[in-house]
Image: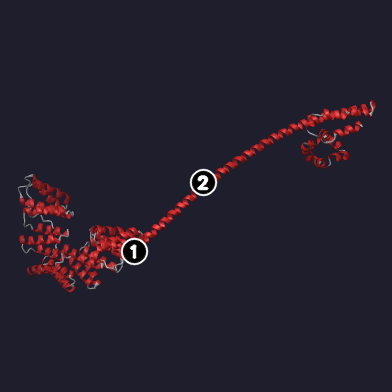
């Protein structure tokens, strides 16, 4: 369907390009005789003519405008200045400015044929075919039987689908000018639009023959790419694809930038799914004519067909700016957003627009109904999933927050435990240091006390012997020198009994040198009596052991 539509519109362009080549024709400055500079206005006019010859349209436009603003006495030059301003603006696609310039031209000269032709073309470019028809009919009253005006009137009738009027005008023209190539070309398109392809083929071939006759008479006349392009379109509709491609190739040899031939080559490539070639051809046309609708349509569908749906979105959007009522393009955009991007909200928007454009012509079997229902269901499902996802995220965030809080608390407790542990270690170290100092002090004191005790024992022994000789045993019992000796013992004996002294100090040295500790724990008194450890103690540690074990007993025995 797209290929057929493209071909029909391409035929319209062929008519515009080849059926009325005079539409943008710039009047040659042969009417404007270059004069010797006499006044300022004429100088500006001559500068404009020179700029046109140099193809410097910007400088020419400025010069002609200066000439128009100052030139009042030479109407002929003023008419040409207005006309050339219109042609330059038309080339810049400033249709409104060109229209005003041509109207100014016609005010000065009502039968200016070229201004009449181009003013009608402007109406056609704006798709105001009714105004164009009215204008050309009026122009033919001013310039009767003019072939340019008649050819353009045929073209406008065809575009407005007034085929009978187009045929009548064409027949009248060919009756007066049977060798008119442009009439044959335009009539070819009139029959092509009515799908009378055999008649269209015959007229197109006759157009080529008439051109060959004209070229024999005037070798300066070149070949016409439009004839080859139109014949190629006819062959396409007749199913002769190879013949069509051959004709399009001939058209491109004559004019490499022939948009009709390029578009139809792209259409054939698209039909056979040669997407790369079709895309390349359409892109070339768009470079030549950025707003060419046929090229934009072909490129958008070719890119979409090649699987690059996302890349086709801006192409369809641009197309809709030029053709806002193109329902098919709107539906395709909905399909892209539904199928490829999964943006169901946008898809539903485009489906609604498509339904609105179709209006009462929308059939019950149209797939848009199912698509809209599916899109709504997808939106509801997406909303539910979104809620679930948000709830999950909320719970996850709360869990992470709680976990972070717990980690922070555990870290604080860990630091607190470590601080307590360090404090306990420090206290234990301080306590051990104090214990060592105390032990050293005690050992020193016990050493001194041991020596003093030993001396006391020696003194007691000597005194005991004396008492044995001088006094009887009863007196010694009364005096109880041993008890006095006990009383005279250092402070240690007063504070702690002998057993406690055995547990604290002598154990350390006994472990190092002999097992005195075990002996002390089991039967310290008996073993001391039997084995007489006093002698051994005298060898190793006489003061301490003699003092700690049984100093009192020995004193008691000797006293007895």
**Residue at 7% across, 70% down:** 175
Name the quadrant containing residue 17: bottom left
Q: Which residue is mark 1?
A: 373
Mark 1 element type = helix
Name the quadrant containing residue 231: bottom left
Q: Position of residue 58 (x, y in %)?
A: 17, 50
Q: Is residue 454 left or right of residue 304?
A: right
The front one of 429 and 90 is 429
The front one of 318 and 215 is 318
- The quarter of the rendered structure image containing the C terminus is top right
Numbered tag placed on residue 405 in the rendering: 2
Mark 1 / mark 2, whichever is N-terminal? 1
Q: Residues within 10 Å of mark 2 (few under 14, many from 20)?
A: few
Q: Is residue 384 left or right of residue 4?
A: right
Q: Residues within 10 Å of mark 1 (few under 14, many from 20)?
A: few
Name the residue at the bottom extreme: 198
- The quarter of the rendered structure image containing the N terminus is bottom left
**Residue at 16% across, 62% down:** 16
Q: How many marks?
A: 2
Mark 2 element type = helix
Can residue 127 be seen at all in this image of the molecule? yes
Q: Position of residue 212 (x, y in %)?
A: 14, 69
């Amino acid at each position: 369907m797209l290929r057929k539509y493209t071909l029909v519109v391409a035929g319209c362009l062929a008519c515009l390009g080849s059926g009325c080549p005079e539409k943008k024709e710039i009047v040659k400055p042969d009417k404007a005789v270059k004069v010797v500079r006499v006044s300022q206005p004429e100088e500006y006019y001559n500068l404009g003519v020179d700029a046109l010859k140099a193809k410097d349209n910007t400088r020419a436009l400025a010069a002609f405008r200066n000439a128009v603003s100052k030139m009042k006495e030479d109407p002929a030059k003023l008419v040409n200045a207005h006309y050339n301003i219109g042609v330059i603006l038309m080339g810049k696609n400033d249709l409104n400015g060109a229209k005003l310039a041509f109207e100014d031209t016609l005010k000065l000269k009502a039968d200016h044929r070229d201004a009449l032709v181009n003013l009608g073309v402007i109406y056609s470019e704006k798709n105001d075919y009714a105004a164009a028809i009215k204008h050309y009919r009026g122009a033919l009253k001013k310039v009767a039987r003019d072939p340019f005006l008649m050819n353009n009137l045929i073209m406008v009738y065809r575009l407005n689908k007034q085929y009978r009027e187009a045929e009548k005008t064409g027949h009248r023209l060919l009756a007066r000018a049977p060798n008119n190539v442009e009439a044959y070309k335009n009539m070819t398109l009139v029959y092509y639009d009515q799908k009378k392809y055999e008649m269209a083929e015959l007229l197109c071939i006759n157009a080529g023959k008439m051109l060959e006759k004209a070229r024999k008479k005037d070798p300066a006349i070149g070949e016409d790419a439009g004839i080859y392009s139109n014949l190629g379109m006819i062959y396409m509709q007749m199913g002769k694809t190879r013949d069509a491609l051959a004709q399009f190739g001939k058209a491109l040899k004559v004019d490499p930038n022939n948009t009709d031939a390029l578009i139809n080559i792209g259409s054939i490539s698209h039909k056979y799914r040669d997407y790369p070639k079709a895309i390349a051809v359409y892109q070339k046309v768009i470079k030549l004519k950025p707003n060419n609708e046929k090229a934009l349509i072909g490129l958008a569908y070719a890119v979409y067909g090649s699987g690059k749906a996302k890349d086709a979105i801006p192409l369809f959007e641009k197309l809709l700016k030029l053709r806002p009522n193109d329902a098919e393009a709107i539906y395709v955009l909905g399909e892209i957003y539904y199928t490829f991007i999964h943006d169901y909200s946008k898809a539903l928007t485009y489906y609604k627009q498509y339904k609105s454009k179709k209006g009462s012509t929308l059939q019950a079997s149209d797939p848009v109904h199912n698509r809209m229902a599916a899109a709504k269901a997808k939106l509801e499902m997406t909303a539910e999933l979104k809620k679930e996802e948000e709830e999950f995220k909320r719970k996850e965030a709360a869990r992470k927050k709680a976990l972070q809080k717990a980690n922070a608390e555990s870290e604080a407790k860990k630091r607190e435990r470590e601080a307590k542990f360090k404090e306990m270690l420090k206290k234990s170290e301080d306590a051990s240091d104090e214990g060592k100092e105390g032990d050293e002090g005690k050992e020193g004191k016990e050493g001194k006390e041991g020596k003093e005790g030993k001396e006391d024992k020696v003194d007691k022994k000597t005194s005991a012997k004396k008492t044995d000789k001088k006094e009887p045993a009863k007196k010694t019992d009364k005096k109880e020198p041993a008890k006095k000796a006990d009383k005279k013992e250092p402070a240690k004996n007063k504070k702690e009994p002998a057993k406690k002294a055995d547990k604290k100090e002598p154990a350390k040295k006994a472990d190092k040198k002999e097992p005195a500790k075990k002996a002390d724990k089991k039967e310290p008194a008996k073993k001391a009596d039997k084995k007489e450890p006093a002698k051994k103690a005298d060898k190793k540690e006489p003061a301490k052991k003699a003092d700690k074990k049984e100093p009192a007993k020995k004193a008691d025995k000797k006293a007895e």
